């Protein structure tokens, strides 16, 4: 059954219609000053505290094999449609409780990227500094979070604490609790009911393709602290909440709740899963005093992450061909053995990263990147023993690395690149490492090195080159670019470097690589910096000069299965310098759409066991 459902998911995912479902959503959550035991309701951000105790919960059990148990709740089919608003409210409450129950065994990845803002006379609010959080959220009884970003040699939670508090408390007297940004995945984890809330019907409204009933929610007088206050959107078929917008009420003195806009996507039958939260605080009107001013995006994914146990995979084992058709009937020569070894390391690393939710499954975005790599290779007469492949990291920080013959680029970096020329620049550097034989990671051919918890990925894997190799790769990359079809497009690549240089001192968290080399060093761009020399002057006021894009504009990540796709958004005309928002965080406005049941062929359930593997090997059908 499990396998069958997975096949169904694969089928569905390969359907173009599905793209709409994966639109970006943003999640925002209130900041919480949080006692060590996770509170049942969001806690306000409190006045500064240098000692933040919140011991990080130990890593979530890293590997509950979770299949797609995504049948719509049984009860639903038997329910008559509600005829009064009271009945609608009852249904909403029931559906929310079902969602909470459905998600409780899961431990999705949560990423929050936050930019503190300062006022620029020309550009408006721009980033002043930034913070990055990445962790797994345990959605069982309470909401806990374990972190990927612990620093080496530090006690558990200490690295996180430092990141959280670094300088912020002093300046703003507020602290960011990463958990705080993900509170608004549910309106109220425990007390979402009529005893605690008043529901006021406001109106009907379409969000994307989905017709919604809109309710304003206010906590009852004696409902206690940390209650949701704001608006919810309910789709009008099953009465699931699809969007929450507001804050939490009754903060105590010296405390504060953030405002959040939280979106859910219908990625599986019967459930709308929390996907994005956007948060924003700050008042930039004349005379306003900002205690706090920031924008933050929270993304959730990896809901369906399977963890490590091979037992789960047994049902999928398939022997491809009866005879080994590789040409050599001999033992491997020393060089061939070396290459085999590197490939083994490469396969190990990619598989491990994917299992941790940090690498998107191979897909269409890879093909785009590979085309660019091919263009550079062909025009430079590069022939490698194995084809170069590309993959996408699911995370936001701007980074690249290569392992064996695979180039890995982060989602965030692809997002901010303005065009193909700048993409070629990014890929050429890693291609140069491969061409020059700067192979890293052969130690990962030993399988014991893959045995670590997902949260410890950054402590156990790393692909940083020595400075000499970095310089050599840059030099080779420029050489290759100049002989490639991108030779005429290097102005935009140089402009991108210039824009990055302009913002780099304020974006240290976004520029902190976790697996590869940093693109910058102490606020100065080092990677491919030479290209900036020949580029035109950077001019924010020149409206047709787009040096870098905001985050989230290019790649969308499916929170359920971690697949990535290129966003197909209508271009919007830029009318002022403030519209450019290079490297910045923006609100989410996903085009909501229902899970497309019709696109799930019933026949799939009867498909032969090999169906999934076959589908994977063939090009994704497109309509
Ligand atoms: Zn490098």
Image: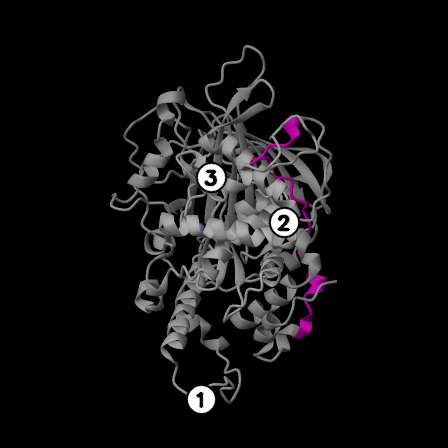
Residue 158 locus on image (x, y percent)? 29, 39
Q: To which residue does mark 3 refer?
A: 510
Q: Which mark is residue 487?
A: 2
Q: Nearer the viewer, residue 313 or 575?
A: 575
State the mark number for residue 129.
none
Q: Which residue is mark 1?
A: 329
Query: Residue at coordinates 45% horizontally, 72% vertically from top-left?
Result: 313
Q: Is residue 79 left or right of residue 278?
A: right
Please name the residue shown 59% across and 72% down the image.
617
| Magenta-drawn stretch, dominant element (helix, strand or loop) | loop
Please tell me how crowded label 2 is: few (under 14), some (14-19), or many (20+) other residues with Cα within 10 Å.
Answer: some
Dot 2 lies on which element?
helix
Q: Would you say residue 590 sits in the magenta stretch?
A: yes
Look at the image and give the residue range highlighted in magenta.
577-603
**Helix or strand or loop: what does disc 1 sit on?**
loop
User: Would you say residue 94 is visible in this rendering?
Assistant: no
Q: Earlier in the sequence, mark 3 or mark 2?
A: 2
């Amino acid at each position: 059954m499990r396998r069958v459902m997975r096949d169904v998911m694969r089928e569905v995912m390969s359907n173009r219609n599905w793209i709409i479902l994966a639109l970006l959503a943003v999640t925002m959550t209130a900041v919480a000053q949080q006692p060590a035991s996770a509170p049942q309701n969001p806690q306000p951000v409190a006045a500064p505290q240098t000692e933040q105790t919140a011991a990080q919960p130990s890593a979530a059990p890293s590997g509950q094999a979770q299949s797609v148990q995504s049948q719509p709740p049984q009860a639903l089919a038997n329910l008559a449609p509600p005829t009064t608003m009271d009945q609608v409210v009852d249904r909403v409450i029931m559906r929310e409780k079902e969602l909470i129950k459905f998600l409780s065994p899961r431990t999705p990845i949560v990423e929050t990227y936050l930019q503190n803002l300062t006022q620029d006379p020309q550009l408006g609010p721009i980033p002043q500094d930034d913070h990055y959080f990445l962790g797994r959220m345990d959605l069982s009884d309470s909401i806990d979070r374990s972190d990927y970003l612990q620093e080496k040699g530090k006690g558990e939670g200490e690295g996180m604490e430092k990141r959280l508090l670094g300088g912020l408390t002093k300046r703003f007297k507020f602290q960011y609790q990463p958990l705080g940004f993900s509170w608004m995945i549910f309106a109220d984890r425990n007390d979402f009911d009529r005893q605690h809330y008043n529901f006021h019907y406001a109106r009907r409204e379409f969000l994307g393709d989905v017709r919604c009933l809109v309710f304003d929610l206010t906590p009852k007088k004696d409902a206690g602290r940390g209650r949701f206050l704001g608006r919810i959107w309910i789709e009008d078929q099953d009465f699931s909440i699809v969007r929450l917008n507001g804050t939490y009420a009754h903060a105590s003195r010296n405390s504060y709740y953030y405002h959040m806009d939280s979106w859910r996507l219908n990625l599986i039958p019967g459930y709308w899963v929390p996907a994005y939260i956007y948060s924003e605080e700050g008042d930039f009107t004349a005379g306003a005093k900002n205690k706090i001013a920031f924008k933050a995006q929270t993304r959730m994914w990896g809901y369906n992450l399977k963890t490590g146990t091979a037992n789960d995979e047994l049902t999928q084992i398939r022997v491809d061909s009866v005879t080994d058709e590789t040409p050599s009937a001999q033992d491997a020569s020393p060089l061939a053995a070396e290459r085999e070894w590197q490939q083994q390391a490469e396969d190990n690393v990619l598989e491990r990263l994917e299992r941790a939710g940090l690498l998107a499954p191979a897909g269409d975005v890879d093909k785009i990147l590979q085309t660019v790599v091919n263009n550079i290779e062909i025009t430079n007469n590069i022939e490698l023993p194995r084809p170069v492949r590309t993959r996408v990291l699911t995370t936001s920080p701007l980074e690249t690395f290569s392992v064996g013959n695979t180039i890995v680029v982060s989602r965030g970096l692809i997002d901010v690149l303005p065009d193909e020329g700048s993409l070629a620049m990014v890929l050429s550097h890693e291609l140069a490492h491969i061409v020059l034989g700067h192979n890293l990671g052969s130690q990962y051919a030993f399988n014991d090195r893959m045995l670590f918890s997902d949260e410890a990925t950054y402590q156990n894997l790393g692909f940083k080159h020595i400075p000499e190799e970095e310089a050599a790769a840059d030099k080779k990359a420029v050489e290759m670019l100049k002989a490639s079809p991108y030779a005429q497009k290097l102005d935009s690549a140089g402009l991108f470097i210039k824009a990055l240089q302009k913002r780099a001192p304020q974006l240290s968290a976004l520029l902190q690589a976790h697996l590869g080399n940093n693109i910058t060093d102490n606020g100065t761009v080092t990677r491919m910096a030479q290209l900036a020399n020949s580029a035109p002057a950077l001019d924010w006021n020149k409206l047709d000069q787009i040096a870098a894009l905001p985050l989230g504009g290019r790649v969308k990540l499916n929170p359920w299965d971690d697949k990535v796709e290129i966003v197909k958004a209508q271009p919007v005309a830029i009318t002022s310098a403030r519209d450019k928002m290079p490297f910045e965080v923006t609100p989410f406005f996903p085009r909501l759409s229902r899970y497309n049941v019709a696109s799930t062929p019933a026949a799939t359930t009867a498909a032969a066991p090999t169906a999934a593997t076959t589908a994977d090997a063939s090009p994704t059908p497109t309509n």
